[in-house]
Image: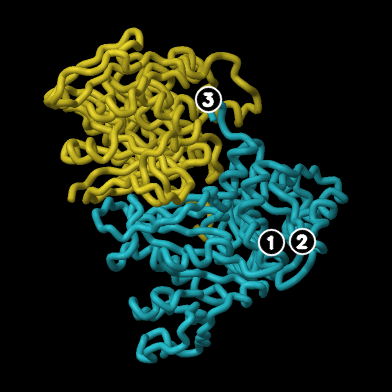
Chain colours: A cyan, B yellow
Amino acid sequence: MGKGMDDTFYMQLALDEAWKYQLLTYPNPAVGAVVVQKGAILAVAAHQKAGTSHAEVLALLSTYEILSQTTIDFDRFDAQRAHAFLLSLPKGFFSKCSIYVTLEPCAHSGKTPSCASLLSQLGLKEVIIGTTDPIKGHDNGAQIVAKQGIKVTVGVLEDACKDLIEPFLIWQQRAFVLFKLAQTTNGRIGGGYLSSQESLQHVHRLRGVCDRLLIGGNTVRTDRPTLDCRFTGENAPDIAIYSHEQTFDDTIPLFSVPKREVTITNQLDFLKQPSFVLVEGGEGMLKALADRIDWLLIYQTPKLSTNDLSYNIEMNLAFLHQARMGRDIMIWSRDIGH
Amino acid sequence: MGKGMDDTFYMQLALDEAWKYQLLTYPNPAVGAVVVQKGAILAVAAHQKAGTSHAEVLALLSTYEILSQTTIDFDRFDAQRAHAFLLSLPKGFFSKCSIYVTLEPCAHSGKTPSCASLLSQLGLKEVIIGTTDPIKGHDNGAQIVAKQGIKVTVGVLEDACKDLIEPFLIWQQRAFVLFKLAQTTNGRIGGGYLSSQESLQHVHRLRGVCDRLLIGGNTVRTDRPTLDCRFTGENAPDIAIYSHEQTFDDTIPLFSVPKREVTITNQLDFLKQPSFVLVEGGEGMLKALADRIDWLLIYQTPKLSTNDLSYNIEMNLAFLHQARMGRDIMIWSRDIGH
């Protein structure tokens, strides 16, 4: 930095906030927003869950609270209420505010009203967009805003903003495949529960939103897992067991979780379906699926171990984001081949 | 978050900024500061280098720029100039501003004027301190500020703020020992240059500020390193080679770096001296020094490898901070024993 806050700093804050909810917004993209007035940061927010208020709306509600020095008394995640409230404010209330948003504001009304329309009606000073929305029919948010005479800038930290929505673009076409792994800092896996409670909860939240959890037959036989969402209370995911052998001991706990479909399969055609598939496994599954994995999510625990359960594979990654998860570090990366 | 920015959010921003300069401020502590007015963030800054402006001063200069919508035209790192400038502003200029600072503002005048005195004269609204300064004689900054009727709060994210200054507290008493390691994501070391250019530059900056670089005799013989600061242009560090054998091939490049002292030693008594010692090595040095290591700094490269050069040791760590370093992730941790 050296010289204070700039466009990149604001957009990075929006990105960091958005990553807290990466994939948890499924089937929506993760989006972050920051509101700035004369260089000062008034709000930082992110979209948290499909069907609830978008990042721009949450950021503007917080901006209202800062500028009016009051607290809103309704559910800010109720998008209809939030839009109606923002539109009820005196004209020009946000006229000195600029909003940084990682993704082009949505142009269409779905479960929530259009953000592009909202921003244009509120008459903000400037809308700074990380990356445009490449989905057809979503792609005129910037035009809607610009048509009202609001300055629109596109392309601040564009590559990082594109990384953020990569899952969203993939799951329009086919399965987005996230491989989850827990390891020590020196790369050892196994040896019982490695992860912090916060990491385990995060895995359960991912299980709660994914369409299917894919796991190897050997892991099922050896670990006898339950694979539910008991730490977060959501519905347990459907399971695909990838196995050549079709018979399993039906006392393995995962088979008796209510409201769950378990499929035992030796092919992966279901990955052609637009969906979000979470994979939990070790070296065997990593090798079996190497060419199908989009992203790796590693929960790295603060320990060096002499345990010899390591994993051996050649794979080049690109790091996307890192964050603390209790005592662990959570590292998001893209599989870029070998 | 959910409900917008709060004390913890502001202090975390100050912490994240301070970590960018961790150890590079030697012999000063790393310190970060954030200025807030009515909930809006006006400035984020950190102390960058000993002898230059402190975090509070840099944050207040940026605040001046935001509030006046002008740019200062002198060297903001010149502490004398910066203090004089801030004190020349109209009384009450910062009266609506609160400052979040990770460490109690300094009470004494050294190379730079006292920050506690500055803050009290500027009449800020509130000073929120992460942790007090435990060094005797440094410990009445909060009182100096409070005496002027400024509200003082202590203890926001206190543990994290204590972590930040741990090296500073240690190097008052004895050597602070940082063990640097480069590895793949699955814990493989060696196999040539692993690290990104940004990681290598960071290592060279650490070499530029440390008192001594400690390295094992085997590494010297095998790798024939230079161990200078060619990527940053600073003076190369003095070297201690830890070795039972006292003779080395003197054509090994490290011996012919100018203005450098090289010591070959089979004992570690020099670690009793207050100083900052950087260790670069592999499994052997990690095992030899395990009980002497304060922190580990791991540059993790985005690659899974089948290279069998791993490192085997039992060590419990506590993660302190993580950040991107080019394509790598840099992970700071404390050795908490085994």
Q: Is mark 3 on a helix, strand or loop?
A: helix
Which residue is labeled 2 in the image?
Answer: A135
Name the mark nearer the viewer: 2 or 3: 2
Contact (Cβ within 8 Å) of mark 2 with mark 3:
no
User: Do marks 1 and 2 share a chain?
Assistant: yes
Contact (Cβ within 8 Å) of mark 1 with mark 2:
yes
User: Residue A124 vs residue B150: left or right?
Assistant: right
Where residue B319 appears, as percent x and y from the top left, is 33, 48
Please give the name of the residue rendered at 48% of the width and 18% of the height, measured from the top-left corner. B77
Q: What element carries label 2?
A: loop
Which residue is labeled 1 in the image?
Answer: A169
User: Residue B239 vs residue B118: left or right?
Assistant: left
Q: Which mark is residue B61?
A: 3
Where residue A277 appears, as percent x and y from the top left, is 56, 71
Q: How crowded is mark 3: few (under 14 residues within 10 Å), some or many (20 or more)?
A: many
Q: Residue A150 or A199: which is nearer the viewer?
A: A199
Q: Which mark is residue A216?
A: none
